[in-house]
Image: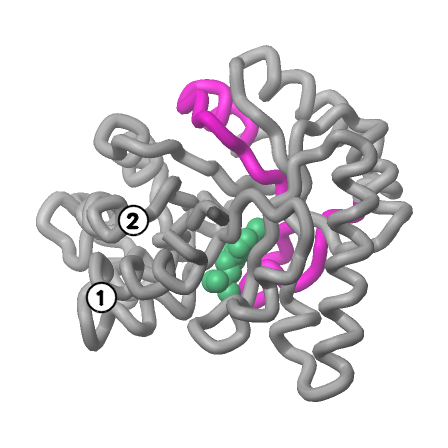
Amino acid sequence: MIKLGVNIDHVATIRQARYRGMPDLANAEPDPVAAALAAERGGASGITAHLRADRRHIQDADIFRLREAIATKLNFEMGNTPEIIRIALRVKPEDACLVPENRAEVTTEGGLDCVANEAALRETVLALQDAGTCVSLFIDPDPEQIEAAARLGAECVELHTGAFANAVGGAQDEELLRLVAGAELADSFGLRVNAGHGINYTNVAKTLRIPHLVELNIGHSIVSRAVFVGIEQATREMAGLLGA
Ligand code: PXP
């Protein structure tokens, strides 16, 4: 059975659309922590949140509250910057997923370049691991990136499924094959294989063909469906598609 990590960033996106810049978010809605608890009731095996440098959705206090409140595990998505690393080392999440971050992007658009940033990433991977956090690297399913992730000593890779999700017809099948090959290679290095980005209630079926897949991280489609059915039910439906 594949685990479902529910990314609750876009619950905070909705909150910030109304409350950005307000000093006190105690009564601001919707509360991403309440959403995380409901996602857990719906079958999430973990909660993912990305504290971006521009704080466009999740805020620092959300991360600390999530850490206290959730019963499953926290997957802290983070850019490789000193400020965010300092916060991660205080939060000590079970998992951290290092992602590239670019202020102009709408969401995380490409995978991390582990080859070009190997030296800078090595220090961060070691610091997080020393704090007891299991480190994942969000990468495209390219052999050079997977090899670099293995050299870096990360426990896990999260394969970027964005190109697969955006492709149609035969091109989507080709992207799926890249993910399959990437997962095989990652597994051969002893890396745990997660995947995510752009997965929805329709395309999720094909992702189940990726071998060695441990966890899918899904945000936008679950939060979107939650507008109609609530996040507990939206999570339950997605967990059901994963075989839970
Ligand atoms: N995994 C990673 C590393 C991401 O950056 C994101 C987007 O925040 C996701 C998964 C979830 O993507 P989506 O919101 O498209 O499901």
- Quadrant in the rendering for residue 107: bottom right
- Quadrant in the rendering for residue 163: bottom right
Residue 97, image x and y in percent?
A: 58, 39
Q: Residues within 10 Å of mark 2 (few under 14, many from 20)?
A: many
Identify the residue at image location x=15%, y=58%. Answer: 29
**Residue matched to label 1:** 18
Compared across the picture, whether 17 is left or right of 98 comes to left
Q: 236 or 59, which is in the foreground?
A: 236
Q: Does residue 11 show up magenta in the picture?
A: no
**Dot 1 lies on which element?**
helix
- Residue ranking furthest to the bottom: 169
Dominant secondary-structure state across the stretch colored magenta:
loop
Identify the residue at image location x=56%, y=61%. Answer: 197
**Dot 2 lies on which element?**
loop
- Disc number placed over residue 43 in the picture, else none: 2
Identify the residue at image location x=71%, y=78%. Answer: 172
Q: Does residue 110 show up magenta in the picture?
A: yes
Q: 26 or 147, which is in the foreground?
A: 147
Task: Give amino acid for label 1.
Answer: Arg
Residue 208, image x and y in percent?
A: 58, 61
Q: Which residues are magenta?
A: 85-113
Task: Give amino acid for label 2.
Answer: Gly
Q: 157 or 81, which is in the foreground?
A: 157
Residue 149, image x and y in percent?
A: 78, 36
